[in-house]
Image (spheres, rainbow, N blue to C red):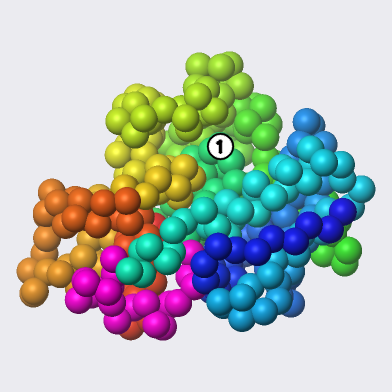
Amino acid sequence: MKIVLTPDGPLDVRGTLARYHRWGEDPTNRVADDVFRRVLRVERRLLAYEVRWTGSVDDARIVIRIPGAGAAVGAAAVAEVRRILGLDFDLTGFYRMAKGDPALAPLVEPLYGLRPTLAPTPFEMLVGSITAQQINLSFAFACRARLVHRYGTPVRVGRETVWAFPEAARLAKARPRELRALKYSTRKAEYIRDLARAVVSGALDLEAISAAPTETVIARLTELRGLGRWTADWFLARCLGRGDICPAGDLAVRKAFDHYYGRGRALSEKAIRRRGDAWGQYQNLAVHYLLAGMRLAQPAVGGGT
């Protein structure tokens, strides 16, 4: 099956997908030779697909190819690709708002068409967030890649191999010592195992949480051992794609705000949230652009995105 998508607004596909190889290997999201490859999980089936693109940033054309798929699978693939490319963000409206901000306005031209990617599934997002807690993103990517290779499922896509992210049932049976062998700390190993068990038992309904109001999402996630406000904020921003979210507790976010708005002083988390509130529904995009702006100035700087 071949499906063609036309984005609403500008889209820099290469720039948007760069987060899947900027800090290391991502076995579940492969970008090579201007092709994006991933495995779609539908009703216990694993279906590999490819995404290619043509045209300019202002006239991008996205082509999804998924072999032997019916209408339901095609719809699932479209929904996943829209998330991965951030197609539902109002980038045009954000640019109008950004023109009035002295820090954001100069970032629009060099980052034109850049969109945040959203995690395809809540479980994948939360495991990734636990992995990235209090470590640099290069080490986090390496740990996550080892986890995927150990517990995921390889699927061939043409000449490439892409790995389906591990199911919760598989990780629920993982022993902490097995995860420690993948360079996870003992606590993170327990956090991932306990998260997976909560999902499998139904104690944590990620589908219901994803549809809940923001404050409910924060409260429900932070009830779980190993998941704090940092994880909840990034879950809201990079899984649920909510526009009015500013992960003010993230170190890289705080550095970006200090750089652009601090005037030589460090801003408190409260001050950062207050500044973010002024952007309303565009907070998520604004944070994404500030972090990307920091990378333009200092390529070695990482971030929560």
Q: Is residue 197 left or right of residue 112?
A: right
In the image, what residue type sits under mark 1?
Phe
Please name the residue shown 79% across and 38% down the image: 72
Task: Decide if residue 250 is in sight here.
Answer: no
**Quarter assignment of residue 300:** bottom left
Crowdedness of circle 1 by 10 Å Cα count: few (<14), some, many (20+)? many
Q: Position of residue 292 (x, y in %)?
A: 39, 72
Whether 105 is drawn above or below 71: the answer is: below
Q: Is residue 82 left or right of residue 288?
A: right
Please name the residue shown 88% across and 63% down the image: 158
Q: Position of residue 191 (x, y in %)?
A: 46, 33
Q: Position of residue 219 (x, y in %)?
A: 32, 27
Secondary element at image label 1 = helix
Please name the residue shown 67% across and 27% down the image: 169
Whether 161 is drawn above or below 169: the answer is: below
**Quarter assignment of residue 124:** top right
Main secondary structure of the magenta stretch: loop
Please name the residue shown 53% across and 57% down the image: 86
Q: Is residue 128 left or right of residue 301?
A: right
Task: Decide if residue 169 is in sight here.
Answer: yes
Whether 87 is drawn above or below 107: the answer is: above
Q: Which residue is mark 1?
A: 123
Question: Is 98 part of what is drawn in magenta?
Answer: yes
Residue range highlighted in magenta:
97-115
Q: Position of residue 70 (x, y in %)?
A: 86, 42
Q: Quadrant of the N terminus?
A: bottom right
